[in-house]
Amino acid sequence: MRRADRLFRIVQYLRGRRLTTAAQLSGWLQVSMRTVYRDVRDLTLSGVPIEGEAGVGYRLGAGYDLPPLMFDKPELQALAAGARIVQVWSGPETASAAASALAKIAAALPEDARIELERTRLYAPSFTSPVPGGLFDRLHQAISQREVMRLGEYRDQQDALSERCVWPLGLYFWGAAWTLAGWCELRDNFRQFRIDRIGSLAPAGRHYPDQDGRRIEDFVRFARSDRG
């Protein structure tokens, strides 16, 4: 990657996040931490308002912007594929947002790039989607609002039915099914629930706190340790 392209990407990464560490930039750009520190310093010296420091993280100062982005062919194909998958393998609201985002990107592209986007031959057939109704969008909303949700007639792998009150923490796509990661009040521990096995879904009428030991990061650590 040319250094100019790398500097441009650093600014793009910083503009879309509240705080970005040098380690994250190093991983995304496939360069050393030392190179990241040097690039950030040079960007700052050239007038880019980068706030923060090494060892803590960086962010872009408010009000700074760059001209519209240009995408190369692999990036356009990735955008098209991602949007098409989301349109089929998520809820109606999220699918509509993906279609709208792709249309906005296409409208801002020059004609040759727009044609390339439309010609992308990567598809997600709709007849294979297992996402039931609006459950995905409702759970997604519950995660954002930290709503405790009541899962009615949940069917496990042995076809046993149960009712659970769950703190929804995240949604995971496994290529054939979506699962809800959450804190199960019945089991007093983390659990995953396949969305297509939820018989009914309703708010429990309360919100859960942002509690130490019960966040999505804690779930990830739990899942990793559970796999040995």
Image (cartoon, helix red, strand yellow):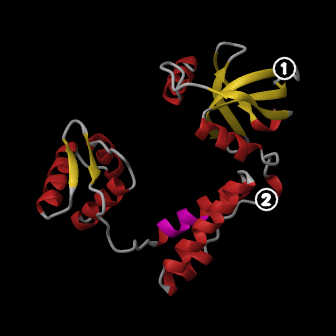
Residue beneath the point at 32% across and 54% down: 14
Using the rendered view, name the quadrant where residue 207 is placed: top right
Residue beneath the point at 28% across and 66% down: 5
Q: Is residue 76 magenta?
A: yes
The segment highlighted magenta reads 75-80
**Frontmost residue, 149 versus 87:** 149
- Observer able to see residue 176: no
Q: Residues within 10 Å of mark 2 (few under 14, many from 20)?
A: few
Residue beneath the point at 52% across and 18% down: 225
Q: Position of residue 165 (x, y in %)?
A: 73, 23
Q: Is residue 89 magenta?
A: no
Q: Main secondary structure of the magenta part?
A: helix
Using the rendered view, name the quadrant where residue 121 is placed: bottom right
Label pair 2/1, CB-CB below 8 angstroms:
no
Residue beneath the point at 68% across and 27% down: 206
Give the left or right position of residue 43, taking residue 201 as reference: left
| 56 in relation to 79, above or below | above
Q: Position of residue 18 (x, y in %)?
A: 36, 47
Separation of marks 2 and 1 at Cα, in angstroms: 30 Å
**Secondary structure category for the residue under label 1:** strand
Residue at image mark 1: 162
**Secondary structure category for the residue under label 2:** helix
Q: Which mark is residue 126?
A: 2
Q: Position of residue 51 (x, y in %)?
A: 22, 49
Q: Residues within 10 Å of mark 1 (few under 14, many from 20)?
A: some
- Under mark 2, the amino acid is Ser
